Image (cartoon, coloured by chain):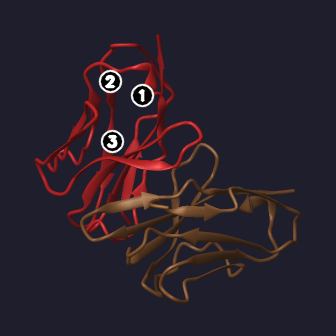
Amino acid sequence: GDSVTQMEGPVTLSEEAFLTINCTYTATGYPSLFWYVQYPGEGLQLLLKATKADDKGSNKGFEATYRKETTSFHLEKGSVQVSDSAVYFCALSYSGNTPLVFGKGTRLSVIA
Amino acid sequence: GAGVSQSPRYKVAKRGQDVALRCDPISGHVSLFWYQQALGQGPEFLTYFQNEAQLDKSGLPSDRFFAERPEGSVSTLKIQRTQQEDSAVYLCASSTIGAGAFFGQGTRLTVV
């Protein structure tokens, strides 16, 4: 079946450092790919998405590119802030209206 | 409200007790999903509705778990004879085509 693998956390960075969180997927078809973020005490929020190969999703300074050849959707941000501290989940689904398959999540801590 | 609302936010149940978890989706959202999130893990799919029809319940871990959405809006996830392994955060999400899934804050169930 379909699956998503994320790099293990926790990841600890200093403010203004460059962030990469790796995500690879295994899929039988051509899914849409998502990054969700869970801030402390809050629910999951959609951060960005890409619906087809070579699409780049971006939001709040984060970006990720759908790479079909490497089955990857790595999350990047050029300069992290303390407020970016959260758990980040990579996920896939078909048509955006079918169940999501999530990775295990990567906890990011940004220190001042 | 404008978002997905879940109640209760926290539930402590004695082993063997039945519980009912409620989800109020975003108005007009056709699809509704239930997920189970164990500590330190990503959400795992439980079941999925399109309007009042339960299209997929393959993720329900046992026949003690039952979900319904009788009028195609509010949904209830019921767990009978709760066990310690049922302790988790139960997440509800609703979606409409093209918009992605919007999550509630979840219900944290602790079985003692």
Which kind of residue does numbered mark 1 sit on?
Asp
Residue ID for mark 1? A84
Residue ID for mark 2? A19
In this rendering, the label closer to the viewer, 3 or 2: 2
Which kind of residue does numbered mark 2 sit on?
Leu
Q: Residue at x 38, y 78 (%)?
A: B30
Quadrant in the picture for residue A59: top left
Q: Residue at x 60, y 56 (%)?
A: B106
Instruction: Tell me the chain of label 2.
Output: A
Q: Residue B24's x, y, as percent?
A: 54, 70
Q: Nearer the viewer, residue A107 or B96?
A: B96
User: Does the CB distance between marks 3 and 1 fall below 8 Å?
Assistant: no
Chain B as rendered: colour: brown
User: Does the CB distance between marks 1 and 2 fall below 8 Å?
Assistant: yes
In this rendering, position of residue B42 left or right of residue A37: right
Q: Is B111 above or below relative to A108?
A: below
Q: Is A88 above or below relative to A13?
A: below
Q: CA distance from mark 3 to mark 1?
A: 18 Å
In this rendering, position of residue B16 left or right of residue A42: right
**First along the sequence among labels 3 and 1:** 3
In the picture, which quadrant includes the C terminus of chain B?
Answer: bottom right
Q: Residue A79's x, y, as percent?
A: 29, 18
Q: Please identify the residue farthest to the front as the structure is shown.
A: B1
Quadrant in the picture for residue A82: top left
Which label belongs to residue A23? 3
